[in-house]
Image (spheres, grey):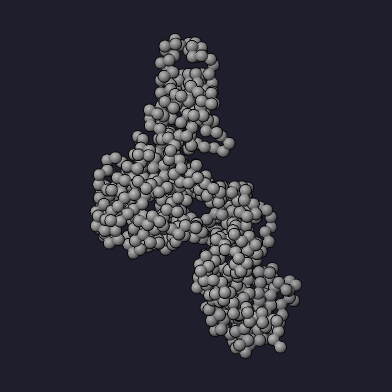
Amino acid sequence: MTSLGRTVRELQRRAFTGRDEEVALFRDALGAPGVLFVHGVGGVGKSALLDVFADVAAEKGFEPVRVDARHLALGRAALPAPAGDVLLIDTYELLEPVDDWVRDQYLPSLPASCLVVIAGRRGPGPRWRADPAWLALMRVVALGNLSAEEGSAYLTTQDVPGETHDRLLKISRGHPLTPSLMVDAVRRGAAPRTLSDLPDVVGALLAQMLDEVPSARHRTALEVCALLLVTTEDLLRSMVGGDAGELFAWLRTQAFVDESPYGLYPHDVVRDAITADLRWRDPGRYADLYRRKLAVFHDQVRATADERERLDLVVLTVVLNGARSPFAALASLPPTMGAHADGLRDGDRSPIVAMTAEWQGSEQAELVAHWLRRRPGDFRVFRTETGEPRGYGACLDLTEADLGVDPGTDAMWGYAAKFGPPRAGERVRAWRFFLDHDHGQRPSPSLTLFVAWQMLDILLVGADTAWSFVGAFGDGELWAPAMESLDFWAATEAGYEVSGARFPVFAHDWRRTGITTYTDLLHTRQLGAPARPAGQDLDEPVLSEPEFTDAVRSALRTLHTPELLRSNPLLRSRLVRQHERAGRTPAEILRDLLDETAATLKPDLGVLIERTFLRPIGVQERVANSLHLSFNTYRRHRDKAVAQLTELLWARETG
């Protein structure tokens, strides 16, 4: 009679998919001495692979001995002395305290023909690799995630409907245990969009993948590592404070943490699981760490002087976050594969014009040629590793003198003029062109670099920038949701046609929604809380210089009359918004700005502003007397002081 164990094993074999290369390697190794050292994160399928190895060995006439370290009492007598030719040791991380004994005494005592397979979370330590004898006898197998085809094949064996495969595989990121856990949830009627929708699955994954966390401080380090793009010791210190050396060293020992030239990073599914668990378990803590992460990343980018290094940092963020994005335009961004952004060089113009003519027609090519002559410094060329142009983009700094040639830039400037004309010294940034030589505007390394360039421009946006327009993409339906999430609204009136093709335009006015408010909006959206629609603040005033002057004078007169001050347009000005601080009302911020600016005036004028407006000592005649001035002289000096104060504030308002 067939045993229950045989039935279970048969079902497990039917569900097993992929790992063809690893199984072939094991087949070839049978019958000869050696060690296969298989390692990978928890849940990646090491135990299932050892089950298959045991079956293959039995089919070939061997008698495999299977040992799981979880079932052993740790010690030198724990491991068996098999007479057979195949020994399979699972969960080897538990035997690491006696690793030297296993390597130097136990394995050499086995029969000369024995093939040993060791499976654990970590690869062989340095003493294995330093011994030339073991190097000759050992093959190291890093067990990675399943391919999309292998994952889909597994879901098919579990009778999961084909239309759900792509979504489930995107959530699992190829980690074998994740879809197997999700299958049960799907059978119970769940339709997850992200891992966060399945807290029970997240809990099971973490239990499988993580070793015991020594302390709350180590837990924080783990959460920070999951939230940051890459983690260095100094970044960890900035997030958790204190001496981060011990925490960083501990992170390096974790099997699910890899190293890169930029720092440490966890495997994708581990990152997702830790983040989803924190967000579900302690949303307030998640929000705080996420906000601090954004600040740390901004500081890191600003502290990097080289433009290419800055862009590399943003590229990594774009690719990582894009893979998790619900928006198709961002989710499809590929790695740059060695491509990089560079300025225009001699010989670049002809290929740029040629690829434009091929993809977008002669009229667009002529416009590109015009801007190449007029603004060569506004172009970036996306180059292959050998330096050949593979794509390009252009972000134009527009002025009124540029009008009359390009219907795209004319439309963007016209929109700005209608809804908030740039004031003296303010910039209008127009992302006007983008193409990849081979893929046009479809996903490509060039597209990733172009999007990262836009993100970097936002991170470094100056106080002198009035508008940013994105009018380079032809597929408005694809890009609209992503642009809306970035607080760029569809500027319908600014859309334009070239060579019969329609180009939508997306807009953001930095005077109405400054970088501080902008960051808060993105943070709110990331946390899933309701956020106001992009462009909702379009009705907010953008003050002309005369209007700004009147508002300053009114603010000084009503500074101590709150009900009147509340209606002052300065409270909604860029000047105030860009200085927003937690716990401070706009009126309080305005008072701070008036104080700070008055302190920079000449002492006699500063005192006059303070006694008359900021901390009045009585009617103006009394102020004049306190300064030993006639009333006419006092008024002349007062008007001069107000004029200089206004001039300084206006300079800050317009950057």
Q: Residue furthest front?
A: 189
The picture places residue 67, in percent across and down from the top left corner, at: 69, 77
Is residue 306 in view from this perspective? Answer: no
Q: Quadrant of residue 437?
A: bottom left
The picture places residue 596, in percent across and down from the top left corner, at: 50, 29
The picture places residue 147, in percent across and down from the top left corner, at: 51, 71
Is residue 26 in view from this perspective? Answer: yes
Q: Residue at x 32, y 43 (%)?
A: 413
Q: Nearer the viewer, residue 497 or 29?
A: 497
Q: Quadrant of residue 269?
A: bottom right
Q: Residue at x 60, y 72 (%)?
A: 45
Q: Nearer the viewer, residue 593 or 521?
A: 521
Q: Nearer the viewer, residue 208 or 214?
A: 208
| Figure check: 50 above or below 379 | below
The picture places residue 234, in percent across and down from the top left corner, at: 56, 50
Q: Residue at x 43, y 40 (%)?
A: 538
Q: Residue furthest bottom?
A: 61
* The C terminus lies in quadrant: top left
Q: Residue at x 56, y 60 (%)?
A: 194
| Figure check: 102 above or below 362 | below
Q: Is 471 left, or right, of 156 in this rendering?
A: left
* The N terminus lies in quadrant: bottom right
| Figure check: 555 above or below 36 | above
Q: Is 332 left, or right, of 196 in this rendering?
A: left
Q: Nearer the viewer, residue 456 or 65?
A: 456
Q: Is 80 left, or right, of 419 in this rendering?
A: right
Number of numbered labels in the structure image? 0
